[in-house]
Image (cartoon, helix red, strand yellow):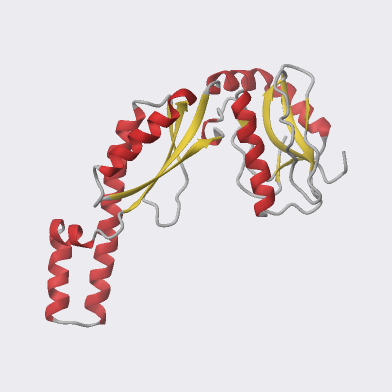
Amino acid sequence: MPTQGVYVYGIVRHTTAVPTGLSGVGTPPARLTAIGRGAVRAVVSEAPARLRARRRDLMAHQELLVRLAEVDSVLPMRFGMVATGEQTVLQQLAATEKACLEALEQLAGRVEINVKAFPAQDALASVVAEEPQVRRLRQDARRTPGYEASVRLGEAVAKALARRAAEAGERIVAELAAAAHAVARGPEVRDCALNVSFLVDRAREAEFRTTARSLADARPDHVDLRVAGPLPCYSFVSAGGPSPAPARTGAAWG
């Protein structure tokens, strides 16, 4: 393959076929293939000379992983994972084969569901009714209107909304955890009070989503819950096998 390297999408068992009708990242889209000599394979393509997080490439990466996960378990790499060459990939696969197989077994028949808790929309009336400090500051702002009073009130409302969303989110996470095989906290997301992923049986994915929505609907003045999935199991790649890839374009592998 060209000297710009090998783009790595994920690791699968040697019996897992690369889905047809799909192509990889780059312009023109790269041809997908699987390489390896043992019980596991890496799904790869030629790495573009200039790899950027364009929508088309992000979607190609994601769609491939979703299609692979529909067939068998897959250890997904985050977008932008590049090895220096095929030999690097083969060496890494040989060194981590046992750990990869164990991780693939743990993920078999399972998917990732991500849950994000945001402050509730249009909840000011509830916040004023239930939060004494906000109620006091609102009264002060009405008695003595002004910029500083408005700022203090706005900050208090924002803090109360975020705290209420986090508290409601934690209660929801505690209830959902009972229906999941594993739970992983995600990175901070702007304006998001809570970002958590769950490892769930694929057969129970719809039921899990319905439960999450029902729990959120019971707290409409506290949390806006956003549920995404099924997703490739990015958050549950075992530390004993290949570590989750850094979420940056052009990260090195191997």
Residue 178 is left or right of residue 230, and the answer is left
Q: Count the labels in the image.
A: 0
User: Looking at this view, is 252 or 18 the one in front?
Assistant: 18
Outermost residue toward the front in this view: 21
User: Looking at this view, is 207 or 109 the one in front?
Assistant: 207
Quarter occupied by the C terminus = top right
Q: Can residue 242 be seen?
A: no
Residue drawn where x is 55% and y is 21% of the image: 108
Residue drawn where x is 11% and y is 80% of the image: 143
Quarter occupied by the N terminus = top right
In which quadrant of the rendered view does residue 200 lie? top left
In which quadrant of the rendered view does residue 135 lie? bottom left
In which quadrant of the rendered view does residue 167 lie? top left
Q: Position of residue 86 (x, y in %)?
A: 82, 33
Q: Position of residue 67 (x, y in %)?
A: 63, 32
Residue drawn where x is 12% and y is 72% of the image: 139
Q: Position of residue 172 (x, y in %)?
A: 30, 38
Q: Position of residue 32 (x, y in %)?
A: 78, 35
Residue 153 is left or right of residue 95, and the answer is left
Vertical side of 85 occupied by 248: above or below: below
Q: Can residue 208 be seen?
A: yes
Residue 84 is left or right of residue 198, and the answer is right
Outermost residue toward the right in this view: 2
Vertical side of 105 occupied by 56: above or below: below
Residue 83 is left or right of residue 234, and the answer is right
